[in-house]
């Protein structure tokens, strides 16, 4: 019997509570090289799940394995495989993009020559090369988001986690970010993304998960979700149907 490939992410029984339950027993498996969109209304628990996977927030219960590594037992090894990009780019205003990438590469203890080569490639890839020596403090939201994405990718992660990465971006910046993500997936990198822009999820994601009130309501390809709801319609209609059914359950 052939061994099953190790998934990029395997979550089992994940729970998190603040003043109320936010994540309630989530089970989720995402394959290596997959583009997965996690959708849900505001307050559904999407960001909390991603923050737990990225190691930024401890779960109350449950397990998280990243390419077979137990993220709770060996968080440093797990984090080396992961990139985290939030909807609010956190970049030092007094650094240039090149200086920021050098700083982040230093945190990952990358060899200077490797870090420099990777930084140049990322700056060119994201259209930041003409601005490499300008202070980030004068950049637009879209520029800062691209710098943050470059910083997240500098250590060549195998799992990229993005929380609303296209929020506030103009069409040109959004296109560049989407092109980079598609290219990464073509190289075998796994991408998990939350977005309220359902057309983006419909066009880019191989599989889609819908959550509400901390529970996974449904997941699958768009065709599988259509079959589940019995409607050959848009992702927006399917999403609204699933959320409404979940609220009524």
Image (cartoon, rainbow, N blue to C red):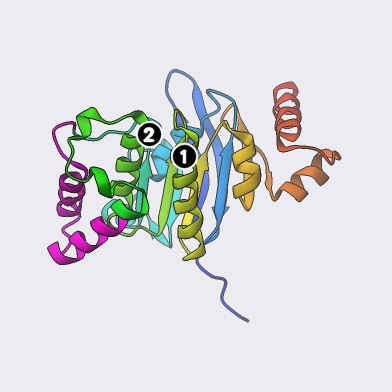
Residue 4 sits in which quadrant? bottom right
Disc 2, SS: helix
Quarter of the image where the N terminus is located: bottom right
Q: Residue furthest bottom?
A: 1
Q: Nearer the viewer, residue 95 or 210?
A: 95
Q: Position of residue 81 (x, y in %)?
A: 35, 57
Per the image, the residue denoted by label 2 is: 142
The answer to whether residue 226 is above or below residue 8 is above
Q: Nearer the viewer, residue 247 or 236?
A: 236
* Residue range (magenta): 93-122
Is residue 120 shown in magenta? yes
Badges 1 and 2: C-beta atoms under 8 Å apart? yes
**Mark carried by residue 172:** 1
Q: Residue at x 33, y 53 (%)?
A: 153
Which of the two discs, 1 and 2, labels the residue nearer the N terminus?
Answer: 2
Disc 1, SS: helix
Q: Nearer the viewer, residue 40 or 29?
A: 40
Dot 1: few (<14), some (14–19), or many (≥20) neighbours within 10 Å? Answer: few
Q: Residue at x 76, y 29 (%)?
A: 241
Quarter of the image where the C terminus is located: top right
Q: Position of residue 211 (x, y in %)?
A: 61, 34
């Amino acid at each position: 019997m052939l061994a099953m490939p190790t998934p990029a992410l395997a979550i089992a029984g994940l729970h998190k509570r603040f003043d109320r339950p936010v994540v309630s027993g989530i089970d989720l498996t995402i394959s290596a090289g997959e583009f997965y969109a996690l959708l849900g209304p505001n307050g559904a628990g999407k960001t909390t799940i991603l923050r737990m996977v990225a190691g930024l927030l401890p779960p109350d219960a449950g397990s998280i394995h990243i390419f077979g590594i137990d993220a709770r037992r060996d968080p440093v090894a797990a984090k080396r495989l992961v990139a985290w990009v939030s909807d609010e780019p956190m970049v030092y205003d007094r650094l240039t993009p090149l200086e920021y990438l050098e700083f982040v590469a230093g945190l990952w203890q990358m060899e200077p020559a490797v870090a420099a080569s990777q930084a140049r490639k990322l700056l060119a890839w994201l259209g930041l090369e003409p601005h490499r020596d300008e202070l980030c403090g004068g950049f637009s939201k879209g520029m800062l988001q691209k710098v943050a994405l470059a910083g997240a990718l500098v250590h060549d992660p195998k799992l990229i986690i993005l929380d609303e990465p296209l929020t506030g971006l103009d069409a040109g910046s959004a296109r560049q970010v989407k092109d980079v993500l598609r290219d990464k997936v073509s190289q075998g990198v796994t991408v998990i993304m939350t977005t309220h822009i359902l057309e983006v999820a419909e066009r880019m994601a191989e599989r889609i998960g819908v959550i509400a009130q901390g529970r996974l309501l449904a997941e699958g390809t768009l065709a599988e979700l259509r079959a589940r709801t019995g409607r050959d319609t848009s992702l927006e209609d399917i999403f609204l149907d699933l959320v409404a059914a979940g609220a009524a359950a």
